[in-house]
Image: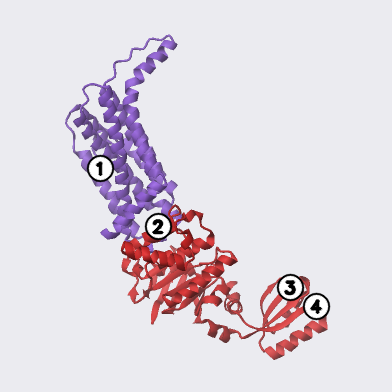
Amino acid sequence: MNKNLLFPLLKNELAEQLRSGKLIVLVFVFLFFGLVSPVTAMFMPDIISSISKSQNISIVVPEPTWLDAVTQYVKNLSQMISFVLIIVYMGIIAREKENGILVFLLVKPVKRSSYIFSKYISVTIAAVLGMSASFAACSFYTYLFFDGFLLTNFVYLNLLIFLNIISTLFMVVFFSSLFKSQILAGVMSFVAYLVFSIGSQLKELSEFLPSGLLIQGNNAVLGAKVSITPVIATIVLCMLCVVISQILFRKWEA
Amino acid sequence: MTMIKCVNLTKIYGKESVAALDNLNIEVNKNSVYGFLGPNGAGKTTTVKILTGLMRQTSGEFFIAGLPNNINSAELRKKIGYLGQEPRMYSGMKAKNLLMFVGELFGQSVLQRGKKADELLEMAGLSKVSGKKISEFSGGMLQRLGIAQALMGNPEVLFLDEPTSALDPIGRKEVLEFIYNLKATCTVFMSTHILSDVERVCDTVAIINKGKLVVQEKTEVLKKSYSDKIIEIDFSGNQQAEAFEEKIRSVNTCEILSSSQNKLRIHPENIEKDKAGLLKIITSSGFEIEKFEVVTANLEDVFVKLIGGKQDE
């Protein structure tokens, strides 16, 4: 890998994501879900009780705890964010094939491996920025609204969610490197996401899927034992995405 | 010195039986503008894509500035510049920033690339708009910026694929002048189907058709050796021209190179004999003409002569 060219490519990719607004949108979406999770958990009982009063129905809603906020946070970041990530990044390479930017770059002394690495690293940086915003917002408001919030456990949970998000992003980049159409790349990423989500319903299988990280995330929050298997499985999946896309991309022809 | 050498270069797409490129052998000399001519679908873009490392050949080999081919060779790409049919660049970038980025990809220092970018923007007549976003550029400006970015790495060989096809006449003129001035510093390989462009700027011409090399020759030599004199007749009306065309096709002594509206361009077998014969037909059949002239053949005539008949095969 040409390290000297990886940096300009990465810098340019991040600048492009900023110029197109993708990075800003992504960070705001993460921030929003980080913010909305504790706020919803805090005020949901009040909302439900005001609705039930107006309907003359009596609903008893238990006092919310920090666990409600965190559960909501996990749901938002594992489901809603995944769709956003697929939509935002499905064209990260496929679109450059479509609009000719890839040809513009590949006739320069750019190694194909550097190009692919720059894409994977850029989405990792985007995920770090997004997760940081989300983590900061959620932990601050959860700490503010609820008693007994365990920050250390929340940090563990966020690391597992981060890895889950990285696996989704790496799959998107992988499919984007594989196909010429960004729509096809998006559809395939969505199908893979669905397959993994459904697979996680099977206990034996969930251990080996990125979605199994969320189950371990719940264990981490509750201070229970966390299995390392989904972590290893996810890292292997991510590495496979990088290696296979590298191999296939070396053969790509304009 | 030979800067590009193709030896039996062949490309067959997928499971197709017909070769898009069929044993192409060409040689391009240093500091020349090489016109790679052919009708649409002749294999021009395929050739350029192979030579720039964007596509693999099925068989054969090529050398650029002495380096052998390899689709993943960054070393090879340090020696070339490329501009595709339509210039594709980061539209949100400013012109100078784009050139700076390209310079960085070629490993130039900030100082080097800044100087080179300013120099090329000046050369391309884009100095005043260097801070403008590329999305705001006109077609001609885009094309000139496209060439400028292709020159950013000081290439030994510059590949231009149909560089003027999307331009208006003014844009074309600007770009052709720009290309012509480049041969002092690098070798230009220009693929095109616009004959007048080749005639204007190219020293050497290769004509390909259906993936096969038809001819490779110095532009002037080609014009002289394939057809030196042409008879051009302007009729007073389109019907007159059509009737005359029909008449001489039946006589079948000379070849009609082109007919457009009321004008016919004819390649005579024997200039004196055919001139007299044609004038006789005109006077005896009462055709009304506005002009009857013997002119020197242009590249279009040569092209039609070499390709024309083969197109329908």
Residue type, mark 3 in image = Asn
Residue placed most toward the observer, B25 or A3: A3
**Disc 2 is attached to a residue of which chain?**
B
Looking at marks 3 and 4 on the same chain, the residue that comes earlier in the sequence is marked by 3
Looking at marks 4 and 2 on the same chain, the residue that comes earlier in the sequence is marked by 2
Chain A: give its colour: purple
Is any part of residue B49 visible from this angle? no
- The CA distance from mark 1 to mark 2 is 39 Å
User: In the image, are marks 4 and 2 on the same chain?
Assistant: yes
Residue at mark 4? B288
Residue at mark 3? B262
**Disc 3 is attached to a residue of which chain?**
B
- The CA distance from mark 2 to mark 3 is 51 Å
Residue type, mark 4 in image = Glu
Q: Which mark is residue B97?
A: 2
Label 1 crowd (10 A; few <14 / some 14-19 / many >=20): many
Looking at marks 2 and 3 on the same chain, the residue that comes earlier in the sequence is marked by 2
Quarter of the figure that contains the C terminus of chain B: bottom right
Q: Is residue B311 left or right of residue A234?
A: right
**Disc 4 is attached to a residue of which chain?**
B
